[in-house]
């Protein structure tokens, strides 16, 4: 059975977590920079010189370099190629001098690491680029024009047009998703709730507002183009792309890839259409983006409002109080001052009414129609103690005597029930028929208690000493009125009998 590619171990990333990761990463980062400069095959002497130019690796040895280069070849990070051009003697040729080339996997890993290293902290970046929608609209317009003239250009032009469409779409998708994630992150949310956010409030809202306006202008036109350009109509366009792809010389066998490429192009195009148009069962990502952007503006507005209310709460009201004081000072009589006070401060003394819950179920009943309730008020002082009445002792002797007699009578009945199953001071489970649940409970309790005694003996509540012997090799079914229990056979031997229970 062959494993799925996603289940295989990526051995090419082993150098990132190896013990000498610092040296491996420095070597492969040098290969990556040289690859970007279109230099593919690097000699060990050049790598050694580069390593020693770094202060941390100033004492780096040549033998160590060759060992690590060989290890990187085993991890599929490098390809070793024997250098035969510089050999001047037979001895040099026998040494098998190599030059090394980085593998495509390694180049992509290093390219990803370079991008990750440029990211600031653990936060998302991204942006809401209005121009990308305009560029995508222009690319789709160009594609539709070419479809109307029956694709008269060469295949390379159409491949460039395809790459333009999806480059702009990829930028829109990743940039907007990252920026939405940045806005919704916990760190950004906490910063928005501080007063320092007021400085950036206008900048943020203008940025989001302009993006929404631009989006609304172009989204409808993009949707119209995508609605018209169905995968069925683009069959000839996809064939042009496949033809161009086949024209690129490859040593690998790609005879069976044409159908796969066609399916790949259709799936990519369908994902683009679904992002803008949605489907019968799923909302388009464009609508989600518009809703999230509007929600961000509303959230910022709420935060600004709360910050303003908080600032207003802590604002000094000295001038307000001085203004009120002048009002009172201008009152000519005390009665006039009382009237002003009632308006400014309200009533000085308030009567509270309390009703018991469930007095009436009528929602329209008037409070004054209910019967008054008398409530005893306790003094609000710490040393107050409520009055208590002296209690009396009640003798429960008769009640205890009756309970004791009832208990003893129950024990006698139980003892008589146990004795019913005894045969010559022995009870053997396998010989019992159907028993009462109480008997089963008693026998099981004797077995449990005997397990804690070395001699497997237990003294019962009836003054009897019972020795319990289990036969682990013989399992029986103990039947009772409420069920059947499978258990090892047991023998209960009554060795001694105490006095009767009285």
Image (cartoon, grey):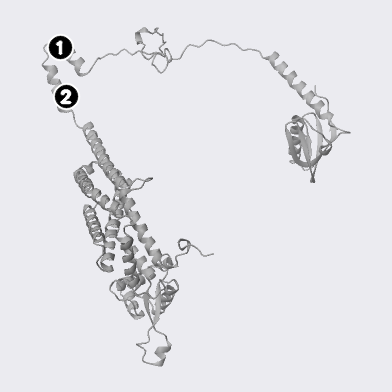
Query: To which residue does mark 2 refer?
Result: 321
- Count neighbours of disc 2 (C-alpha within 10 A) and say few if under 14, some if 14 to 19, many if 20 or more: few
Placement of the C terminus among the 4 image quadrants:
top right
Residue 121 position within the rendered picture, expressed as x and y whole percent measured from the top left:
31, 55
Residue nearest the observer in this picture, 31 or 327:
31
Q: How many marks?
A: 2
Residue nearest the observer in this picture, 243 or 166:
243
What residue sits 51% from the left and 65% below the top?
2
- Count neighbours of disc 1 (C-alpha within 10 A) and say few if under 14, some if 14 to 19, many if 20 or more: few
Placement of the N terminus among the 4 image quadrants:
bottom right
What residue sits 83% from the left and 26% below the top?
499
Q: Quadrant of residue 315?
A: top left
Residue 134 position within the rendered picture, expressed as x and y whole percent measured from the top left:
21, 54
CA gap between label 1 and label 2 equals 18 Å
Residue nearest the observer in this picture, 208 or 246:
246
What secondary structure is marked by label 2? helix
- Asked if residue 123 shows in the view, the reply is no
Query: To which residue does mark 1 refer?
Result: 336
- Asked if residue 419 shows in the view, the reply is yes
Kindly give the residue lying farthest to the bottom in the view shown: 89
Q: Quadrant of residue 368?
A: top left
Q: Is residue 182 left or right of residue 325?
A: right
Residue 338 position within the rendered picture, expressed as x and y whole percent measured from the top left:
18, 12
Residue 400 position within the rendered picture, expressed as x and y whole percent measured from the top left:
70, 17
Instruction: Say if 183 sits above or below 64 in the image.
Output: above
Q: Is residue 309 left or right of residue 380?
A: left
């Amino acid at each position: 059975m062959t494993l799925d590619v996603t289940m295989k171990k990526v051995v090419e990333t082993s150098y990132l977590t190896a013990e000498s990761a610092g040296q491996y990463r420095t070597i492969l980062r040098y290969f990556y920079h040289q690859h970007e400069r279109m230099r593919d095959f690097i000699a060990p002497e050049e790598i050694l010189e580069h390593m020693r130019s770094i202060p941390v690796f100033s004492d780096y040895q040549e033998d160590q370099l060759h060992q690590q280069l060989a290890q990187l070849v085993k991890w599929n990070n490098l390809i070793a190629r024997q250098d035969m051009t510089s050999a001047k003697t037979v001895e040099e040729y026998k040494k098998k001098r190599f030059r090394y080339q980085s593998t495509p996997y390694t180049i992509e890993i290093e390219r990803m690491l370079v991008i990750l290293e440029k990211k600031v902290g653990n936060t998302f970046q991204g942006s809401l680029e209005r121009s990308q929608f305009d560029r995508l609209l222009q690319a789709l317009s160009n594609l539709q024009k070419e479809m109307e003239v029956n694709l008269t250009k060469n295949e390379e032009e159409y491949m460039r047009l395809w790459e333009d469409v999806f480059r702009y779409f990829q930028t829109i998708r990743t940039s907007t998703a990252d920026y939405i994630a940045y806005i919704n992150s916990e760190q950004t949310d906490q910063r928005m709730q501080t007063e320092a956010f007021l400085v950036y409030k206008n900048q943020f809202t203008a940025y989001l507002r302009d993006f929404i306006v631009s989006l609304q202008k172009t989204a409808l036109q993009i949707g119209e183009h995508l609605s018209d350009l169905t995968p069925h109509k683009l069959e000839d366009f996809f064939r042009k792309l496949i033809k161009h792809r086949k024209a690129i010389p490859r040593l690998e066998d790609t005879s069976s890839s044409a159908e796969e490429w066609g399916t790949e192009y259709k799936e990519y195009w369908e994902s683009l259409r679904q992002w803008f148009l949605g489907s019968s069962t799923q909302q388009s990502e464009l609508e989600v983006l518009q809703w999230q952007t509007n929600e961000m503006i509303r959230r910022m507005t709420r935060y600004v409002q709360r910050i303003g209310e908080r600032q207003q709460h802590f604002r000094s009201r000295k001038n307000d109080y001085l203004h009120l004081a002048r009002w009172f000072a201008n009152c000519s009589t005390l009665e006039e001052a009382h009237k002003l006070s009632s308006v400014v401060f309200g009533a000085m003394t308030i009567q509270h009414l309390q009703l018991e819950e469930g007095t009436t179920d009528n929602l329209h009943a008037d409070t004054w129609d209910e019967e008054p309730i008398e409530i005893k008020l306790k003094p609000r002082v710490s040393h107050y103690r409520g009055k208590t009445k002296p209690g009396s002792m009640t003798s429960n002797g008769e009640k205890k005597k009756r309970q004791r007699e009832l208990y003893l009578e129950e024990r006698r009945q139980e003892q008589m029930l146990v004795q019913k199953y005894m045969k010559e001071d022995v009870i053997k489970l396998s010989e019992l028929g159907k028993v009462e649940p109480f008997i089963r409970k008693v026998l099981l309790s004797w077995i449990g208690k005997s397990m804690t005694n070395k001699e497997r003996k237990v003294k019962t509540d009836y003054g009897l000493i019972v020795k319990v012997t289990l036969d682990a090799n013989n399992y029986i079914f103990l039947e009772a009125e409420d069920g059947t229990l499978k258990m090892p056979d047991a023998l209960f031997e009554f060795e001694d009998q105490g006095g009767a229970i009285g």
